[in-house]
Image (cartoon, rainbow, N blue to C red):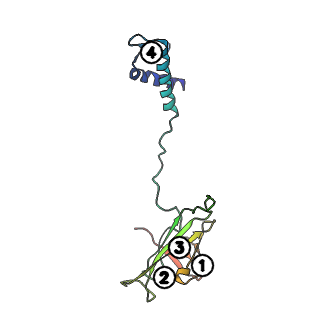
Amino acid sequence: MLRKVLVVAALAAPALGYAPSSGVLGLRAQSEMSRRDVCTAFGSALGLGVAAVVAPQGAHAEKARSGLSSPFTGDYADPNHPGCARSVKIEGAPMKPDGTRSRNKVAIVKGQDNPKGGACNGEPDLVSWKLEGKVAETGDKILVDFTPKGGPKDLTGTWDKDGIVFPDGNKWAKKVPQ
């Protein structure tokens, strides 16, 4: 480490007004120098060396992605409503009133339905909806409040390799991004 400091001191010397020589510190004055000037120059060079050695390097991390990395996040096909949009996005755990974070991440479920029921393909007047829920601590289940759509408060959806299975046997198959 001392070698690195001395290298940095030698490199910083010209910027500080000194030129290399064969002295103890490897510095000599371009003009008359006092002991204070020498100590100041060495201290500055030493500070630069410590900063160069101690300064953290870039993290080379990947860019952050939107949403959390969860198997639930994505678009789905609902066989009970063919062609109707279904999407799930998992967000971070909300802040509680005491300033701590909840243990459960938030699940945002959005979709569209045909007001006449059935398929959405080609229908001009679709009804959009948005529901909220939470991810179970185990990470393999979501509990969604379907009351705004006339359903149960905490409908449990379980992750099943390639989609979400609900208690009635309906499975939303996750669409593969193209």
SS assignment at label 3: strand
Q: Nearer the viewer, residue 42 or 86?
A: 42
Where's residue 139, x and y in %? Answer: 60, 66
Q: Earlier in the sequence, mark 3 or mark 1?
A: 1
The answer to whether any part of residue 7 appears in the image is no
Residue identified by numbered label 1? 153
Q: Amino acid at mark 1?
A: Lys
Residue identified by numbered label 4? 27
Where's residue 58, x and y in %? Answer: 47, 42
Q: Nearer the viewer, mark 1 or mark 2?
A: 1
Q: Nearer the viewer, residue 168 or 160?
A: 168
Q: Earlier in the sequence, mark 2 or mark 3?
A: 2
Q: Nearer the viewer, residue 158 or 109?
A: 109
Q: Tell whether 159 sits left or right of 82.
A: right
Q: Is residue 93 above or below residue 168?
A: above
Residue identified by numbered label 3? 163
Q: Quadrant of the N terminus?
A: top right
Q: Earlier in the sequence, mark 1 or mark 4?
A: 4
SS assignment at label 1: loop
Categorize mark 2 by other alpha carbons within 10 Å: few (<14), some (14-19), many (20+): some
